[in-house]
Image (spheres, rainbow, N blue to C red):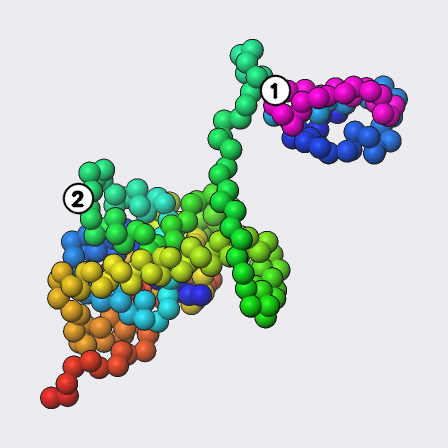
Amino acid sequence: MVLLAAGLDTRAFRLPWPDGVCLYELDLMGCAAGGATRAWSAATRHRVEPSYRGQPYRGMVPPMKVDKLSVSFDPDLGDAVRAAARHSGGGVSRWLADAAAAKLRAEALSDFLDAWEAEHGSLTSAELSKAATELALPKPASTEPAA
Amino acid sequence: MSALVLDAGAFVAVDRADRAMVARLRMAQQAGLELRSTGVVITQVWRDPAGRQANLARLLKSVDVKAIDEHLGRAGGVLLGIAGTKDAVDASVVAVSSTGDRILTSDASDIGPLVAASGRSIHVVPC
């Protein structure tokens, strides 16, 4: 029996392995370190570090960098964020990261459009109205004086 | 939140400073639509590592570019099978679109059957 990415999993100790089972726990360096092989159950337990061409395998993907932030919320907002995160099926960190990324993209779009109009001239009401029709969106409020 | 999903033609139009295209982006912004696309669409339009596609580079900061993982890959493949078409990039665009979204494309005749295959109510806008 091989347990992939065993980490600190305790199945090796908890489950009633039948006599004669040879149990391998496979994980990266560090996770698999300190592998005591004491017989905790009927199974024979081995901790295995993967290797590639004789060298310890340290993973093809570099460790993911995580920037941990401490943020403060009004209690009601904090509750709303937790509820929204639960509703989305993810954690609070993921929900907040998605919300922050969306906010940054929205600000980038605003900056892009403002810079574009500064360089190429403001979009006219007629141009915006035509675009709104194409996209099936409400017509913009006119910014040009009535004829 | 609904999205304005950008096909290659939309990016090309921005890159050549097309006013009608930028007006669509402004209206999308005012309506609160987010911009979305896929990595393979970017492959179709990005050619310059030296920064000469400045408009495109600036616009990309505002686009949620979705990676096509196994789940989306399969979804796009199913759409191709139903629609009887072969363009994987078009399929990726429809696969990341949801009901209520708009797809901006220069290839509406190919996107249309994929949208129909998806069964979603998606507005296809030629550009």
Q: Residue at x 61, y 20 (%)?
A: A50
The relative height of residue B124 versus residue A141 in the rendered view (above or below) is above
Residue B122 placement (x, y as % from top left): 40, 65
Q: How many marks?
A: 2
Return the residue found at the far bottom. Answer: A147
- Residue B4 position, x and y percent, is 35, 62
Residue that numbered label 1 is attached to: A50
**Would residue A42 appear left or right of A133 to someone viewing this image?**
right
SS label for mark 2: loop
Amino acid bearing label 1 = Pro
Residue B36: quadrant of the picture: bottom left
B9 in the magenta segment? no
Callouts 2 and 1 on one subunit: no
Whether residue A40 is in magenta: the answer is yes
Residue A58 screen position, x and y as percent: 54, 23
Residue B52's tag is: 2
Quarter occupied by the C terminus of chain A:
bottom left
Secondary structure under tag 1 reads: loop
Relative to B123, A46 lies left or right = right
Residue situated furthest top in the rendering: A54
Q: Amino acid at mark 2?
A: Arg
Residue B113 x, y percent position in the rendering: 37, 57
Label 2, label 1: how far apart the Cα atoms are: 46 Å
The quadrant of the image that shows the N terminus of chain A is top right
Q: Chain of mark 1?
A: A
For this view, does A18 lie left or right of residue A72? right
In this view of the protein, which residue sits in the foreground, A106 or A30?
A: A30
Task: Give me the disc on residue A17.
Answer: none
Q: Is residue B17 left or right of residue B67?
A: left
Mark 2 is surrounded, within 10 Å at the Cα level, by few (under 14), some (14 to 19) or many (20 or more) other residues, namely: few
Q: Tell me where the magenta segment starts and ends, as one range.
A: A29-50
